[in-house]
Image (cartoon, rainbow, N blue to C red):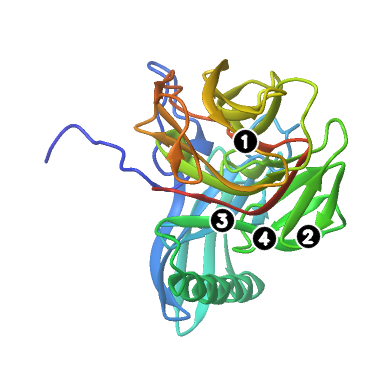
Amino acid sequence: MEKTWTEAVRTLSGVWVRPRSGAPLDEGLHVGALITATIEGRKVMLYTHKASHSLEASEPNALYLWVTDNNRTLHIGPVSEDSVVNKTFDNTMLYSDGALHLLQAKGVHGKDKAISLARLTEELKTIKSVLRTWAQLDASFSASSTPTTGLVGFLSNTSSGGDTWIDDYRCVNAAVTKAAKVKNGFKFTAPGSMATWPVNSREDNRQYSFVNHRFTIVATVTIHQVPKGSTPLLGAGLGDGAGKNIVGLSYSMDKTWETVFDGKKMTSNTTWEPGKEYQVALMLQDGNKGYLYVDGVIVGNPETIRNLGRWDMKSHISSLVEARGTSTAAM
């Protein structure tokens, strides 16, 4: 057997990790149980993964159930939580005769073991419902002329409470700030108005780790007025609070597009018009090559950016813009 393993693009969140040299392997960096199954006529993989139930937790303290069709991924749970005196140190799953079971071994440091078997009835209902949604959307998109291979998320016409833009695939929703709902999207007009899509953030248990290597995010946008200065339009950043886009597109008061690579902004020689609808695409390939497209035409020169290894990525749609039908994909 070969001694070197290479991480494939679109691998599963939490399955492959790069532990620091000399550091012990964190229990939150590996899969507990992993099985394959055919549910609702779809081949999927089910696996468990420990994660922190809250950002305040000092260590992974909850067991989550994940389901993937090797394209999009959903986590459910937690299905079990640890306490100071009762921690899960081993688990396995069984899917048989249309039922899903979770077997756990709990104790403290492997001592005072207790074995429990639970039937994950409600979790399986959720999985079946989500898989039906995936199948319906895939069938709908396959009939369109737009390439959708690798599509993992789609923000369209559904919102919740005015501050959440619902992912039609029911995986990762976007948070909306100071925006008005319009058909198939939102209108961002006030200072500080934006939508943030945390597709690989700690808060969402790093749902899509493929963005460490490559991704494409596409948005249909309309700019309604000329800004007073350079204004961010669509960007992908680290979500570290610094506000810097690693790949992004801005628009200027001179009606020109501005590209952003690794936080550095450059003016292009292509222009935009108020009130005109554009399809904007951001792309990362091979972990360090950035591309920007407007209506299928590349804007500026492709740039090599830092290979960050692991992104804590959040994508942003910013002010003075109307955005519809935003999607992200692993290409």
Q: Residues within 10 Å of mark 1 (few under 14, many from 20)?
A: some
Residue at mark 2: 159
Query: Is residue 114 visible from the viewing direction of this image?
Result: no
Instruction: Identify residue type, mark 2.
Output: Ser
Q: Residues within 10 Å of mark 4 (few under 14, many from 20)?
A: some
Provide residue 181's location: percent of width, then percent of height. 83, 56
- Element assignment for label 1: loop
Q: Which mark is residue 253?
A: none
Instruction: Identify residue type, mark 4.
Output: Ser
Residue at mark 3: 153
Of the two numbered discs 2 and 1 in the rendering, the one whose residue sits closer to the viewer: 1
Mark 2–mark 3 distance (CA, rounded to whole Å) = 14 Å
Of the two numbered discs 2 and 4 in the rendering, the one whose residue sits closer to the viewer: 4
Provide residue 93's location: percent of width, then percent of height. 47, 64
Provide residue 310's location: percent of width, then percent of height. 48, 28
Residue at mark 4: 156
Q: Is mark 1 in CB contact (under 8 Å) with mark 4?
A: no
